[in-house]
Amino acid sequence: MKKSIVISGLAAALLLAGCATPPPASTAAPSATAGGATTAAAPASDFTACMVSDAGGFDDKSFNQTSYKGLTDAVAQLGVKQNEAQSKTTSDFATNIDQMVNAGCNIVVTVGFMLGDATLAAAKANPDVDFAIVDFAYSDESGANTAPENLRGLVFNTGEPAFMAGYTAASLSQTGKVGTFGGAKIPSVTAFMEGYAQGVKYHNEKKGTNVEVLGWNSESQDGQFIPGASPFEDLAGGKRVADTLVAQGADVILPVAGPAGEGGLQAAQASGGKVIGMWVDTDGYVSMPTYKSIIATSVGKAMDVAVFEAIKASKEGTFNNEVYVGTLENEGAYLAPFHDFDSKVSAETKAELEQIKADIIAGTITIEA
Amino acid sequence: MTELTTPATKRRATFQWRGIAITVAAFVLALLVGAILMIVSDPEVAGQFAYLFTAPALPLGAAWAKVSSAYAALAVGALGSPAALAATTREAAPLICAGLGVGLGFRAGLFNIGAQGQAIVGAILAAWVGFALQLPPVLHVIVALLAGLLGGALWGGIVGYLKAKTGAHEVIVTIMFNYIAVGILAWLLTTPAFLRPGRQDPISPEVHPTSTFPGIFGQLHVGFLVALLAAFGTWWLIERSTIGFTIRAVGANPNAAGTAGMDVARTTIITMAIAGMLAGLAGVQVAIGPAANGVPTPLSQGIVGSVGFDAITVALLGRSRPLGIVFAGLLFGGLHAGGLSMQSIAGTPLTLSMVLQALIVLFVAAPGLVRTLVPFLRERRAVVAGGQA
């Protein structure tokens, strides 16, 4: 009895919801939504750009997602078609790359060093398809590029803007202690932390300050990381680590931990204005608006730009295996605007940062990260 | 689990038919729920339902196009060609092995939640033998295989020992051992012995070709035959050997088994060691079994994926019997292989194939739920069952 009432209720709801008149335009057969459901604004093209994620998935608010934005930008601006595959385990990588090649992709972009072997093997097996890989480059011991003609590594010298962030942090610190922590001890994370620490050191040398870096030691090349099996997803773990840094006196925190870095921002927010946060990969003021009042600046890593450029080059037939290195100079790595902190960063510091940027580009300041 | 008390073959046969019917119904229900999810989650298709009564062809056509293309891709990716079938066997092999490990535990009344950790330890040892040692071709595979089996057996055996000698509950201990295995792998991947020369990324060198399971056809490799052999061995162990009889007796009633003079503690240790060995074999499959590009995936964090947890569902679906586990493993392997092509061909997220797996297990694990939903199906199913009998 009860069931029939529920069913008739549902039917009534459907009846009410289902009485709209279809717009005349759509009397044509509805488009099958196979293939990623994209409506291109730019003139349509048969060129297909594809992407394979690492285990994270494209909604990780971090590097998979930023790279994915490069693909969607290409769809919007170049009119290419898109296709993508997420991976559940590491053994899916090879399958997914194969599937993308079989689906007729002209360029396949893979995200993360974990896909390095599978991407190289696929590039060798499919010389007609272009490949690009984010956060990885192929080189031998002498540093020479060993990638085949159709494979481009996309790497980012994030130490450069992190150096500027470290300099900014040192200038903002009241306690004389600034902090950073990472998701895991992998080069793409530690590059930020090392650059940050060197920026602080540079500030100490130039301005005679004695600001201490907590969470990273340039000498031992080791620091504070979130423990656990999936540290990049462990938001609570990020907050705990940040709280420890705050307890030790740090009043500027740079979390380098993907989604878990949000825990660092939470710790800063909880301090009621005493602790300043920074963000990495994207401009946190834009991507994490909840925390915009406490984000002084962000160390940007323009993976979307690099991916977009690789797709564009492939479409225009100018693709080559030359490694793309994002730097301050080509804006593949950048220091985001100060936004709300614009008034708190002194004009002197801003001028010095401009000088540092010029010096880094000119090569008079070198960052070993 | 109650096979010791089999009263009459006839009742057993009808029970199995009902079990199969419920499994099939669970599968159909899961596909139906999956179809609804696909329609609801795609705004373009869901939006068409505003015209359900004015122009029913629009929403129904859109929904049909969506669902049929996705399920067609799933079927093609899992069964559509010899190559797809080979891919299914490759995906199934580790699931079968780990499923056997969990299922064997069930038969002895032990909840082995630690297949994940046992597989990780197996994968670590097999991969290490694969990339660090130089051995002649056939011998290399065998040594890597044995190393992985030994690692899994040890990891499971410790749990059995703790359970038998101290009474520590195996669920807690196996879960904790999963964490320990994950931690050990993470730590090893920072040490020079496991790091790839010249790299700081936590990834090991590729294993030598001599230590790789040889391919047979497409992605089908010797590892699948090893998995079938393991299934046969487990069947023999459970149904034909003295140890197996003891395992079933202890599983049915440990107190009665003890009173009958069986060594319950020893049986617990042996069962967990063998279960760990089978789960370790799953780790071997991923460590030295070639992936789609013909080369095994190098050891890294996440090498075994979630095989240890999927194995629990495989064992449940296979009702802890080796043959059932082989079919359940093939089903899940097919769902995964098909799920990957579903996302590349039909643009359906990979998560949907995981949802399908979860739904199938949900319906299988809750036969009462299926029976409640069945009034729609029961008449039809009765006809079908009658026709088959």
Image (cartoon, coloured by chain):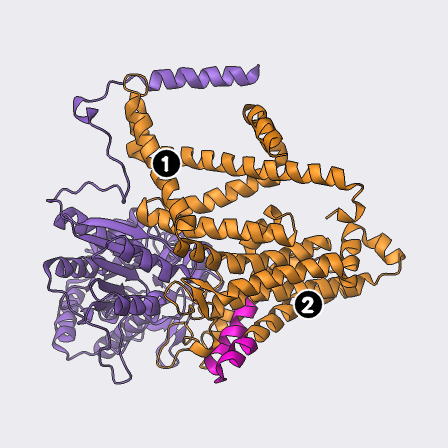
Which numbered circle lies on residue B67? Answer: 1
Task: Indicate the chain coloured orange by its letter.
Answer: B
Q: Is residue A285 above or below residue A360?
A: above
- Residue B234, located in which quarter of the rendered image? bottom right
The answer to whether residue A131 is left or right of residue B131 is left
Is residue A277 at all visible to an observer of this figure?
no
Instruction: State how far apart marks 2 and 1 are (Cα).
Output: 46 Å
Identify which residue, A365 or B328, lies in the foreground.
B328
Quarter of the rendering containing residue A24: top left
Is residue A126 covered in magenta?
A: no
> Are the residues under badges 2 and 1 in a single subunit?
yes
Viewer-closest of B21 and B340: B21
| B271 to B347, vertically: above or below | below
- Residue B108: which disc? none
Which segment is the magenta one? B118-144
Residue sitting at x 64%, y 47%: B319
* Chain A drawing hue: purple
Is the stretch drawn in magenta largely helix, strand or loop?
helix
